[in-house]
Image: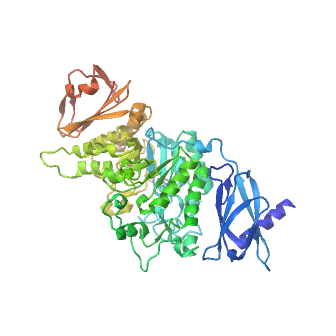
Amino acid sequence: MKNIILLFVSLSLWGQVTKVEPPFWWEGMNDTTLMLTLYGDDLAHYELSSHDLNILDVVRLQNEKYLFVYLDLENTNAGTYELKLKQKGKKSITVPYTLKTRREASALRKGYDSSDFIYLIMPDRFANGDPSNDAHPDLADKPNRQDPWGRHGGDLQGIIDHLDYIESLGVTAIWNTPVVEDNDPKGSYHMYAASDVYQIDRRFGTNETYKQLAAEMRKRDMKLIMDYVVNHWSLEHYMIKDLPAEDWINQWDAFTPSSHAKEIFSDPYAAEVDLKELVNGWFVESMADLNQKQPQLLKYLTQNAIWWIEYADLSGFRVDTYPYNSREEVTLWAKAIMDEYPNFSIVAESWVMNPIHLSYWQKDSPIAAMTGFNSQVTHVKDFALFAGVAAAFTEETPWWDQKMNKIYKVFQNDFVYANPNNLMVFLENHDTTRINELVDFEEFTLVTTLLATVRGVPQTYYGTEIGMRGLKDNGDADLRKDFPGGWPDDSRNAFTAAGRTELENKYFDFTAQLFKWRKNEPVIHYGKTMHYAPKNEVYTYFRYTDTKTIMVVLNANDTAQELDLKRFDERIGTAKVGVNVFSKASVDLSNTLNVPAKSVNIISF
């Protein structure tokens, strides 16, 4: 009899209330107020009651299909409860709602930090672990590997299947580009236009598959980072197709793109019109710009972010297009997450090259403090270093300068950050020319060593470790090629040494050796830095603690160089002998050091 009653309730719910979000919640959360979003026919004319749940408020907006129900869960234990919807002359509706028990110590989960090494994956292009989900009848964009903008079939199972490979590189965290549903009719593999923020795209798998990925990573002491988009949704999202209220999105008389003036919040001379266009303008015509000032939308976005952290056991977010959001509201969003999970990590994508404007978005920034603002974001992406490395190896350098100065001078600006260790350092991502288009193998060893040994959290991009290339001028798809061996019918499998070319194995072996060494070096994770101005294109710096020193020598010169080690007495001190961390050979620190052309030396003492 009980099963029959539950079936009746389920059918009643489906027939009258087509969506309840969040789909479930947890007891014992720090914020005990929960907003339920109910969507269905004529819901605004119903009255709500519950014997077991404390209803604080019911908000009705312009669209009569929506009800926003605020609950106080402070003294509510895990279990299934009921909401009753009644309207005179109509059949009442029963909506069951479940509260779950949280994982033990869920609130204390550890985020990523400078001891981690992050591997960025575009799931559609990495590996196809389940060909049966390449298409879905409810989703428009179908697979076509011949189309650079088509879906290629990579999925979450493909990542799970290759966790051993990823771990073998010394990786401790994975950042996937977005994985929630994107039902755009074309180019949806990109995944930055969400059509359902509570549903993993079914061409990637299910919500349970995502949860499984996190669980398998936890077994390896690895962390899962979600790419979260607060700024915009797809036109295919049900709340965009059927707006709860006119102010749910930023609306214009005609399509108005963002000004992309990303430095504007830290610009003392900013014009109001440019600020309005940055925040309220649309990124592209197919992605509606969300108005986070709308209170129910802000609560919806906040709860959705927290739901994924709790559900999938996440360690961090990477937040897309951070400066494009409404500043005060996105700060409240981030603060609510950090209040719930004090050790969580959030990195803001602020695509600006000037450290002053980058610093503005990091929590406790001395730059932002000048304006009375304090972001709640723990990390920012180090686009300044990204630009410096690219410039060093692509731009002409005047005779009186050093190309390595373009890198050296980036670090001279670290005083503008609250915590330079909370910078995510990278050489490329899914939107940029791949680093291997800019450098040869010897130069690759230089810039990758830099990535591994400077302050901050290093992040690499899938395929870089085997020399994959891609040029931005050829279009974004060139940056996002399929990983060879990720598909059952591929002619070779670069996930294995036997399937890689000799050159690919050189790239892989160097990357793996470097980052597996880094994984066990706290002096690199948390040590201090001292660096010396480049001479003859040799950049030398030290990472050190009271008990250990690592000396890094990067020779970008086409010829061998002889270093007079007396120049570095301040850091070498009384040490006479070091050890080359790669060759394990002893290094005499008392006189000079011969550094071959385009080479790397990492010396421990």
Indicate the position of residue 195 as horizontal and vertical percent values: 54, 67
The quadrant of the image that shows the C terminus is top left
Q: On the image, which quarter does residue 512 sit in? A: top left
Question: From what the image shows, is residue 557 above or below residue 583?
Answer: below
| Residue 571 appearing in the image | yes
**545 sits to left or right of 597:** right
Q: How many numbered marks have been drawn onto this rendered protein structure? A: 0
Question: From what the image shows, is residue 434 above or below residue 237?
Answer: above
Which residue is most to the right? Answer: 1
The quadrant of the image that shows the N terminus is bottom right
**438 sits to left or right of 515:** left
| Residue 151 appearing in the image | no
Along the line of sight, the residue nearer the viewer: 487 or 572: 572
Indicate the position of residue 253 as horizontal and vertical percent values: 43, 80
Indicate the position of residue 127 as horizontal and vertical percent values: 49, 53
Along the line of sight, the residue nearer the viewer: 451 or 344: 344
Write the residue at 74% across / 50% down: 77
Colour setup of the view: rainbow
Which residue is most to the left? Answer: 399
Write the residue at 26% across / 42% down: 408
Along the line of sight, the residue nearer the viewer: 19 or 274: 274
Indicate the position of residue 239 as horizontal and vertical percent values: 57, 71
**502 sits to left or right of 41:** left
Q: On the image, which quarter does residue 444 sit in? A: top left
